[in-house]
Amino acid sequence: MSSIGFCLKILSDDIYDYRCYTFKGTNSAQSREVAKRLKEIEKEYEFIRKHNFNIVNEFEKINDMINSLKSYVKSVYNFYWYEIRPHADVCKFIEEIEHRIKVHKGDRLLSIRSFKRVLGNFEESISPKMIHKILTWLKKKNPLSFRCVKRGMKEEIISDIKKKGIKLDADFLCKFIDENNPMEYVKEWNVRPYVNGKRMKNNKIRSLLKKSFYERQVNSIRFRIISPNLGCLPKQVEDIIISYLGFGEKELPASSPKNNIVSNSIRSDCCNAMTIYNSGSGANTFYQCTQCRKYGVIKANGRYSTPSFNM
């Protein structure tokens, strides 16, 4: 039976040098299928490299391709991937791809994590420490469902948890903090656990934490009008970000409907003026008092509703 052979190339990047590996196989259908999948992996990695490893979603795609190849080899040849002695060069090729993807993915996620913490959604603002504690808690509550979730980078854990149907919102964090030590998270959520030198009880600290959860969640809602509420940054920084996006406070898009424009109004039961944010969905509208900084919801029927916390 005739044989087939070709080179598998991994081009150099900012960290690693050029590598070349050789594939040699028979002309059987199984060997041709392995060769085809190897070339697809080589092509996919080159696509990621050309985009300077900025396409994070493609990392998952190439990992799925590699896992699919390993499963195919096991099902056809009836042995595990690492036991392929005739194709040692192929194993080295796959190991090199996996290693480079892991390193570049980690570097990429770490480089944008600080920006995501401020400008990202609610789940991205949660610290890695708290994410790992949440995973530990989930493994204890439901070991069968979460034992396969591996520990790693915060972003990877969040992705795996969401695949299990968990939504990391304020409601979920309230359930988590009810069964865990609240003192571990007071610094992260800017909660002061001491009053006049005395430590508050855990129930009181939990109530303050829950309030912080909902406040941050409201600030993390993405509105149609791109006008971020970055309470933790100076006003001039917020203005710079808004101007960078293409318009200032007085230069809102002309095509935007009136009910989406940020406006001020007066309530008799509030301290002063409040800033109203309409999500554009036709349902609830969120507001924040400009003085006491409290948050609330204007329901679709026009009634005001202030979130209640067990203080």
Image (cartoon, rainbow, N blue to C red):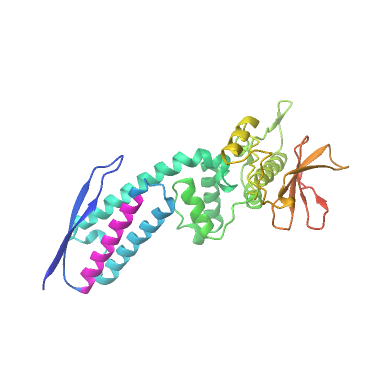
Q: Does the magenta-highlighted stretch encompass residue 176? A: no
Quarter of the image with the C terminus is top right
- Residue at far front of view: 254
> x, y percentage for residue 14?
31, 39
172 relative to 203, above or below: below
Q: Quadrant of residue 244?
A: top right
Q: Does residue 121 show up?
A: yes
Query: Along the horizontal axis of the image, is 129 left or right of 249?
Result: left
- Residue at far right of view: 268
206 relative to 192, above or below: below
Q: Main secondary structure of the magenta part?
A: helix
Residue occupying the point 81% across, 38% down: 273
Q: Does residue 79 show up?
A: no
Q: Nearer the viewer, residue 223 or 304?
A: 223
Query: Along the horizontal axis of the image, is 146 left or right of 22?
Result: right
> x, y percentage for residue 100?
32, 47
Total marks shown come to 0
> x, y percentage for residue 257?
71, 53
> x, y percentage for residue 60?
41, 56
Residue occupying the point 48% across, 41% down: 112
Q: Nearer the viewer, residue 208 or 136?
A: 208
193 relative to 276, above or below: above
Q: Nearer the viewer, residue 306 or 187?
A: 306
Q: Quadrant of residue 64?
A: bottom left
State the extent of the magenta-drawn residues as a range: 29-48
Q: Does the magenta-highlighted stretch encompass residue 35? A: yes
- Residue at far top of view: 197
Residue occupying the point 27% across, 66% down: 73
Quarter of the image with the N terminus is bottom left
